[in-house]
Image (spheres, rainbow, N blue to C red):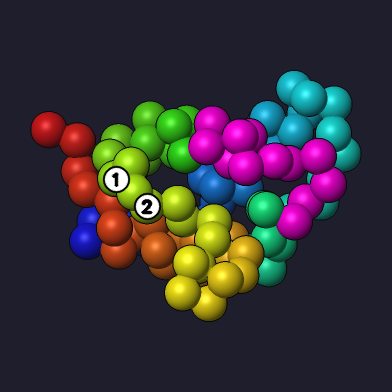
């Protein structure tokens, strides 16, 4: 588990999604209750890019087998708040 605040991770997730959406010229409204995987025009390939950018912004490593925007067990898309919790739980610090 990494020692980064929930608020910071949520903010960075929303920031990166907004940056990518702006680049793709997709208009999205994002808050902590938004499910990135359900946003119009935001595909799973885009969210994989988001993970890579989050690693750089937060100086962490997100394991390859950890897709923070989806819960396989529950088979549901996660909102930004739940995604941040999952990221904090599974990410590791860069060395």
> 10 Å neighbourhood of mark 1: few (<14), some, or many (≥20)?
few
> 10 Å neighbourhood of mark 2: few (<14), some, or many (≥20)?
some
| Residue found farthest to the top | 23
Per the image, label 1 sits on a secondary structure element best described as loop
Disc number for residue 63: 1
Left or right, 46 with reference to 7: right
Question: Residue 73's spot in the image, x, y percent?
Answer: 46, 74
Per the image, label 2 sits on a secondary structure element best described as loop
Calculate the distance from the C-alpha at mark 2 to the C-alpha at mark 1: 5 Å
| Residue found farthest to the left | 95
Q: Is residue 5 above or below residue 27?
A: below
State yes or no: discs 2 and 1 in contact (Cβ < 8 Å): yes
* Residue corresponding to mark 2: 66
Q: How many marks?
A: 2
Does residue 81 appear in this view? no
Q: Name the residue: 68% across, 30% down.
A: 20
Q: Name the residue: 59% across, 66% down.
A: 78
Q: Is residue 20 above or below residue 60?
A: above
């Amino acid at each position: 588990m990494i020692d980064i605040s929930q608020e910071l991770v949520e903010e960075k997730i929303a920031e990166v999604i907004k940056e990518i959406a702006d680049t793709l010229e997709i208009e999205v409204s994002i808050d902590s209750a938004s499910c990135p995987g359900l946003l119009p025009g935001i595909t799973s390939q885009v969210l994989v890019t988001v993970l890579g950018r989050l690693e750089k912004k937060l100086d962490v490593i997100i394991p390859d087998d950890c897709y923070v925007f989806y819960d396989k067990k529950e088979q549901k898309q996660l909102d930004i708040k739940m995604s941040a919790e999952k990221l904090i739980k599974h990410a590791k610090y860069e060395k």
